[in-house]
Amino acid sequence: MHNSNLPIPENEMQRLLSLSDLDLDYSNLEDNFNDLTLLAAKVAGTEISLINLLDSFTQWTIANHGLQVEQMPREESACQYTIMNAEPFEVPDLSIDERFRDKFFVDGPLSLRYYFGLPLKTAEGTNIGALCVLDTQLKTLTPEKIELLEVIGQTVVKRLQSYRALDILKDRLRASNESKKKVAHDIRGPLAGIIGLSNIITDQGNSCDVNELIELVAMINKSSKTILELADEILSVDINKPLADNELNLVLFREKLIKLYSPQARYKNIILEVDINSDNQNIPFSKNKLLQITGNLISNAIKFTPAGGRIKVKLDLIINVDKNLLNILVSDNGVGIDPTALNSIIKGNSSTSIGTLGETGFGFGLSLVSHLVESLNGSLDASSELGKGTRFKVILPQSNPR
């Protein structure tokens, strides 16, 4: 059973999976959608327009007009109600609605009154977020304005999906390049054999004084060496190459986690530390689902760690001949979770309890992490002790760098 006081869509797990399939980096999307928030505000005639995406813990504002906001707890948002249905969600006066009258955005200095939200619906029918317009004055939207806002909402979803499709194409191109490298690797053996044979023939030819044969074989030898050098060049790894859009290294991974989750930690007066192994800090690895996996673990740790507590994140890349291993360790000194309950939560059979500041849990974050790790052929190890904290360790196989 999940917390009945929270609005949770019946297809919540599928909704979260649809959002994770987009594999978004919430830290660098704003410039791609600001034109749409401006247009939405102009159409609605409101002071504020936001594009919000809601995961299990957080409402992420990926673009805004009229209000500088990046994130807030999901349970504090109005958009958590918008994603419940296919139809728009309107609150004529936030200050007299019992669901919102005590929220921070209704009191000063924001003093918001009007809210209108449109669910951002994927082709599969899941609401991953909301396009909303807000104002400090009471408003009325005509059917024509609502229709135009719906078109803008559809454009947001299509643009998100287009960016993901572009990422997939880049992945396939990279896979094609990896295949070329494999071909180059496979030809090295035969070429090395040709060179060795050419050396033998050259030595024998010298003893037999067959000048033309020696000259011809020497040319073959030289050409073979050139091809082998080209193959070695293709196979060489330059860790100083710029990262591709679908890649991270430990340094950039750390920067993104701090940017995204340090505001949540500071809000609860929690110390968030993110450490990396500097020996392998520049080696690239796939970005696929990493921010979703690690972000959910950090948000969960923040929820169950009291003020003055500490959350430690350790990132390492273990170098192996065939597959590198990305190690992600998230530990806290919070209230802990009963081991039996922890196992049930990860399997999606139970909701989490109330957080240390009364945060209410949606109960899907850890089961989503488990699903994503499994889909990447990785492993998830969790341990906890009541009163002492919780520890999650994720190991994800990675292809060797290009």
Image: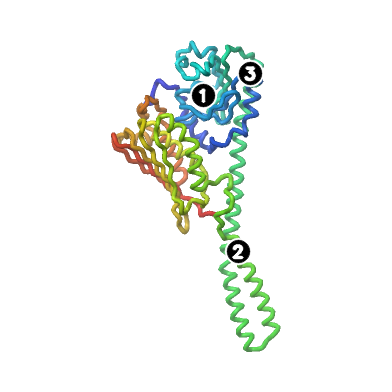
In the image, which is nearer the foreground, mark 2 or mark 3?
3
- Give how far apart the Cα atoms at labels 2 and 3 are: 60 Å
Quadrant location of residue 270? Answer: top left
What residue would you read off at disc 2?
231
Residue 339 shown left or right of residue 127 in the figure: left
What residue would you read off at disc 1?
83
In front here: 392 or 179?
A: 392
Q: Pick whichever of labels 2 and 3 is earlier in the sequence.
A: 3
Residue 383 shown left or right of residue 296 in the figure: left
- Image disc number at residue 44: 3
- Give how far apart the Cα atoms at labels 1 and 2 are: 53 Å
What residue is rendered at 59% in x and 43% in y?
Answer: 168
Q: Does residue 350 appear in the picture of this structure?
A: no
Residue 329 shown left or right of residue 89 in the figure: left
Q: Which residue in the rendered view is the most extreme toward the bottom?
A: 208
Callout 3 amino acid: Ala
What residue is rendered at 62% in x and 34% in y?
Answer: 32
Callout 1 amino acid: Ile
Number of numbered discs overlaid on the protein picture:
3
Q: Position of residue 381 (x, y in %)?
A: 36, 43
Quadrant location of residue 366? Answer: top left
Label 2: how many Cα within 10 Å (few below 14, some 14–19, many 20+): many
